[in-house]
Amino acid sequence: MIKTAILTMSDKGSKGERIDVTGPSIRSAIENNGFVIEYYKIIPDELEMIVDELKYLCDELKVDLVFTNGGTGFSQRDVTPEATQMVIQKYVPGIGEAMRLKSLEITPKAMLSRAIAGIRNKTLIVNLPGSPKAAIENLEVIMPALPHGIEILIGTGGECAR
């Protein structure tokens, strides 16, 4: 089982002024694929708070996978990719590239996503969009590869070469 955290970035959601629909949508999609949700939280779009939360999830809680959602657009308050860059040790460009490539088949707005993915210690962090529809579409693209990647990352997977 892959220990997973979901972190929603939303100023209004963190104040209770908006119901988070995306986080629960992600939860439903990944639980149907055998992932175990260890943690779920909504926080404001504050760079230092996001950095602290990501470090906690990776270093203290030691989850295998963190899905963030929200904060990947062009707004001044959108700082999730920057926070992620500040905590990761290895960049995983293929995940963001694959999500954008597939999303471009649906909408030209996909090229505006700044979502990234990377590794901190033995945790993979993946930025997903804040829109529930877009988050699920992105998950559908990356889910087939994630279990193998996590197995290799945490040391339970075998050799890739044959």
Image: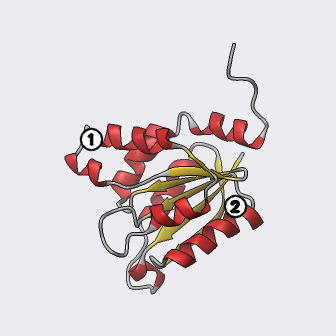
In the rendered image, the residue lying farthest to the top is 162
Q: Is residue 136 above or below residue 15?
A: above
Quarter of the image where the N terminus is located = top right
Type of amino acid at the residue the image marks with label 2:
Cys
In the image: residue 59, left or right of residue 14: right
Give coordinates of residue 19: x percent, y percent: 41, 76
Give coordinates of residue 45: x percent, y percent: 44, 76
- Residue at figure coordinates x 68%, y 23% from the top left: 160
Q: Is residue 48 above or below residue 132?
A: below
In the rendered image, the residue lying farthest to the left is 108
Q: Secondary structure at mark 2?
A: helix
Q: Is residue 40 above or below residue 142?
A: below
Q: Which mark is residue 58?
A: 2
Upstream in sequence: badge 1 or badge 2: 2
Q: Are marks 1 and 2 in contact (CB under 8 Å)?
A: no
- Residue at figure coordinates x 53%, y 34% from the top left: 144
In the image: residue 144, left or right of residue 13: right
Q: CA distance from mark 1 to mark 2?
A: 31 Å
- Residue at figure coordinates x 25%, y 37% from the top left: 105
Give the residue at mark 1.
Answer: 104
